[in-house]
């Protein structure tokens, strides 16, 4: 009987301690959802004077950070290494890479489904032109700064896992000293794992 009473007291004490920890646990869960890694595919093109461009399948990877969250709103940013470019024919393409920092405000339009709109500054990391298996560095011909407007959807699959489908409309000309208005155009399908 004495052992049963001691066991009951221990269970009661553990329950009380757990109840007291609930607010902290919830806070920790929210913090866990605010930092993570993002990765996925880019469906990239360069829009402008060339009408015969084809999209190029590339990739992206980086860090996700939630900055603020309310009941239906989410403000988030990412720092991504993002590969872009375009394919002109079977033997020619532009391969560009940027560090981009999309900043997006998202609104929950349905359960766990957000629509977002934002801004995306980017810094050029590298640029190459490829023709007939010959690669040429074209970084000096490209603007070092890029700017775009991202918009699209983010779906919360689980507490620590999100999927995103975004389209970024390029605003700035990617070439230096050029009258041709050539801009990046990127469709993105990505996943975020929070920790």
Image (cartoon, grey):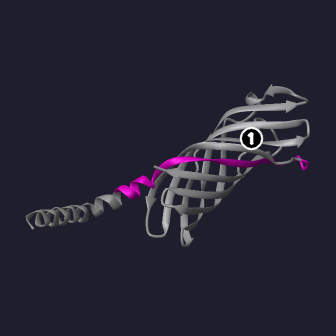
Residue 43 percent location from the top left of the image: 75, 50
Q: What residue do we see at 35% from left, 55% from top?
A: 28
Q: Secondary structure at mark 1?
A: loop
Q: Residue 176, relative to residue 31: is it above or below?
A: above
Vertical arrangement, residue 180 with respect to residue 189, above or below: above
Residue that extends furthest to the left in the rendered view of this protein: 2
Q: Position of residue 162 (x, y in %)?
A: 56, 58
Is 44 a magenta residue? yes
Where residue 140 sits: x, y (%)? 74, 28
Look at 64% across and 52% down and name the residue there: 190
Q: Is residue 67 magenta?
A: no
Q: Residues within 10 Å of mark 1 (few under 14, many from 20)?
A: many
Q: Which residue is mark 1?
A: 174
Image quarter of residue 108: bottom right
* Picture mark count: 1
Of residues 175 and 29, the one nearer the viewer is 29
Q: At which x and y percent is residue 18?
A: 25, 62
Q: Residue furthest bottom?
A: 110
Relative horizontal placement of residue 126, taking residue 65 as reference (left or right): right
> Magenta span covers which residues?
28-52
Q: Nearer the viewer, residue 117 or 72?
A: 72
Furthest residue to the front? 1
Camera-nearest residue between 181 and 104: 104
């Amino acid at each position: 009987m004495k052992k049963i009473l001691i066991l009951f007291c221990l269970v009661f004490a553990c329950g009380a301690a757990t109840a007291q920890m609930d607010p902290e646990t919830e806070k920790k869960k929210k913090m866990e959802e605010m930092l993570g890694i993002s990765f996925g595919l880019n469906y990239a093109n360069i829009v402008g004077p060339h009408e015969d461009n084809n999209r190029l399948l590339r990739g992206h990877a980086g860090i996700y950070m939630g900055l603020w969250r309310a009941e239906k709103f989410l403000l988030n940013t990412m720092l991504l290494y993002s590969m872009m470019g375009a394919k002109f024919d079977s033997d020619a393409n532009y391969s560009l890479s940027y560090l981009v920092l999309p900043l997006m405000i998202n609104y929950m339009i349905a359960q766990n489904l957000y629509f977002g709109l934002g801004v995306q500054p980017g810094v050029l990391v590298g640029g190459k032109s490829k023709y007939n298996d010959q690669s040429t560095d074209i970084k000096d011909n490209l603007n070092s700064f890029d700017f775009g407007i991202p918009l699209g959807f983010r779906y919360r699959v689980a507490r620590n896992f999100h999927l995103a489908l975004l389209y970024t409309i390029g605003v700035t000309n990617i070439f230096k000293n050029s009258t041709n208005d050539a801009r990046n155009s990127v469709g993105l399908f990505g996943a975020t794992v929070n920790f």
